[in-house]
Image: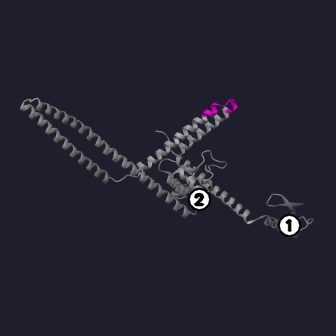
Amino acid sequence: MTVSIISEKGLAKNTVPEKGNTTAAGPAAAAQDVVVSEKDKLENETPATLAAEINQITNQTRRFVLDAVIEIGRRLCAAKAMLPHGQWETWLKDSIDYSLNSAQNYMRLYKQYGDPQGGLWGARVANPIIGQLEYTKALALLSLPAEDREEFAHKIINDNLSNRELAAAIADKKAADEARLRAEAEAKAARKRWEQEEKLRKENDKASAKLDVKIMKLEEKLKKAQINATSEKTINDLKAALDQSKAAANSMAAEYEKELSKLKAENAAKPIDTTVVDSDQVLINHFEAYFESAKTNFNGLLASVNGMQDDNNRKKYAGALRKFLNVLQSRLEQNNLKPN
């Protein structure tokens, strides 16, 4: 009896005698067949094909490792949810051979990258681009806003960035973001200063206009009184009222300049806050833009489904839409984003 030798392509190349079978060609012939098979394989290989195969194996390995880490993260999250409050770290120390930092990293990776629908063997990376990264690089990208990660993942893959190069690129990105936030904060502060100064100016202009009208009327009355030879007392009273109004106008102008200088000094002394408030405002702006786009796209999906004439198609795509909404709900819950 003989056993077939299967080549790399899965085709039976030759046969060798099964142990104890002395009727076949013998060990020497079998060895010669193996040498020939290896020779054929080498003749079909080139540096280019070998590189492609190595890269494919590398990517598959990375994907497997990251998927495994994310599945571990899912199970750690599940265990933490089951345990009474305060027992998580004790359970981790007694039951799992991971440091607290490693466990937290695995859980973060699951929450940020995990596909809520999972795969055949459990949780997996939802984004196939992120799935091509090494664990350490996928973890490093968590320091970036979610909307920037895929762009960086492409950069890592296309430019073959090392961990050190990636850290430098992330630092540059953060520095640029901080500079942008500072510029936005400075613009916001400048706008606020201008609004305060404009409010003060308008209040002063309004009060000054009233005094100017009063002064003008008093001057007209005084002129008429002098022309008509009104009593001395009336003329003196009008002069006194006019002098008083002019003095009030001068005092108001001086007070305005004083208040304006004080406001400018206070604004100059205030540090520009570029921390949480301004960072949140940028993200709020992003959210509003994405949310409006999502509403528009969702309305388009609804219109498409409602416009379908075939009942089967309408049910099929309505089901797909409902499934998608369930996935969104699941992602919200995974990220602890529950409404108040």
Q: Amino acid at mark 2?
A: Ile
Residue of label 2: 156
Foreground residue among 215 and 296: 215
Quick one: which residue is furthest to the bottom in this view? Answer: 28
State which mark lies toward you, 1 or 2.
2
| Residue 238 lies in quadrant | top left
* Frontmost residue, 268 versus 71: 268
Q: Which part of the image, by quadrant, shows the N terminus? A: bottom right
Type of amino acid at the residue the image marks with label 1: Asp
Q: Earlier in the sequence, mark 1 or mark 2?
A: 1
Name which residue lies at 56% across and 47% down: 78
Label 2 Cα neighbours within 10 Å, binned few <14 / some 14-19 / many ≥20: many
Instruction: Tell whether position 159 is magenta.
Output: no
The residue nearer to you, when weighing 12 against 163, is 163
User: Which label is found at residue 33?
Assistant: 1
- Residue furthest right as drawn: 23
Name the residue at the front extreme: 227
Extreme left residue here? 232
- The stretch of residues the image draws in magenta is 302-313
Whether residues under marks 1 and 2 lie with C-beta atoms below 8 angstroms apart, the answer is no
Coordinates of residue 190 in the picture (x, y in percent): 36, 49
Give the distance between the C-alpha atoms of the residues marked 1 and 2, in whole angstroms.
44 Å
Main SS category, magenta section:
helix
The answer to which quarter of the image holds residue 224 is: top left
Q: Where residue 46 appears, x then y in whole percent?
A: 75, 65
Does residue 307 belong to the magenta stretch? yes
Picture coordinates of residue 167, whole percent (x, y): 52, 61
Q: Secondary structure at mark 2?
A: helix
Q: Residue at x 16, y 35 (%)?
A: 219
Left/right of residue 314 with respect to residue 173 in the rendered view: right
Query: Dot 1: within a 10 Å radius of its alpha carbon, few (fewer than 14), some, or many (20 or more) residues?
Result: some
SS for dot 1: helix
